[in-house]
Image (cartoon, rainbow, N blue to C red):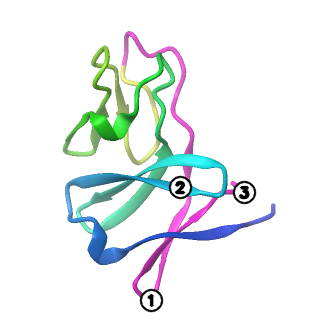
Amino acid sequence: MSQEWVAVAKTADIEPGKMMPVTAGDKQLALYNIGGAFYASDNECTHAYAMLTDGTIDGDVIECPLHGGAFEIKTGKGLGAPIFCDLKCYPTRVSGDAVEVDVAA
């Protein structure tokens, strides 16, 4: 399996319990800090065109701002209607003070 790690933010850019939109190559991603651990997913909701980073975080769940669909941040699993497709997630790692995402995953 190939890997392509791309630095998308500094660890200090995103506080625990927060998220931010980032770009990695041609991908628009949501980067989350959950309890000091970083997670990344596609930023567009799988249900309808809405940016998840415009939504809200509740613990380790992201809620879409458009119709209230929710996903587990750590796995991308959709948590019921109106979600019909899970969210694609990407591996992350911290290298020095940079948060990196494997966009080839």
User: Could you tell me which secondary element the residue under label 2 belongs to?
Assistant: strand
Q: Which numbered disc, 3 or 2, marks the residue that appears first in the sequence?
A: 2
Q: Residue at x 51, y 23 (%)?
A: 46
Residue for badge 2: 23
The amino acid pointed to by label 2 is Thr
Q: Magenta stretch?
A: 80-105
Q: Residue at x 27, y 68 (%)?
A: 36
Q: Which numbered disc, 1 or 3, marks the residue that appears first in the sequence?
A: 1
Residue for badge 3: 104
- Which quarter of the image is occupied by the C terminus? bottom right
Q: Position of residue 91 (x, y in %)?
A: 56, 59
Q: Which numbered disc, 2 or 1, marks the residue that appears first in the sequence?
A: 2
- Mark 3 or 2: in front is 2
Q: Residue at x 30, y 52 (%)?
A: 19
- Which quarter of the image is occupied by the N terminus? bottom right
Q: Quadrant of residue 45?
A: top left
Q: Position of residue 27 (x, y in %)?
A: 61, 48
Q: Is residue 25 left or right of residue 39?
A: right
The amino acid pointed to by label 1 is Gly
Q: Position of residue 69 (x, y in %)?
A: 34, 20
Q: Residues within 10 Å of mark 3 (few under 14, many from 20)?
A: few
Q: Is 97 inside the magenta-drawn segment?
A: yes
Mark 1 and mark 3: Cα distance apart in space: 21 Å
Q: Quadrant of residue 70?
A: top left
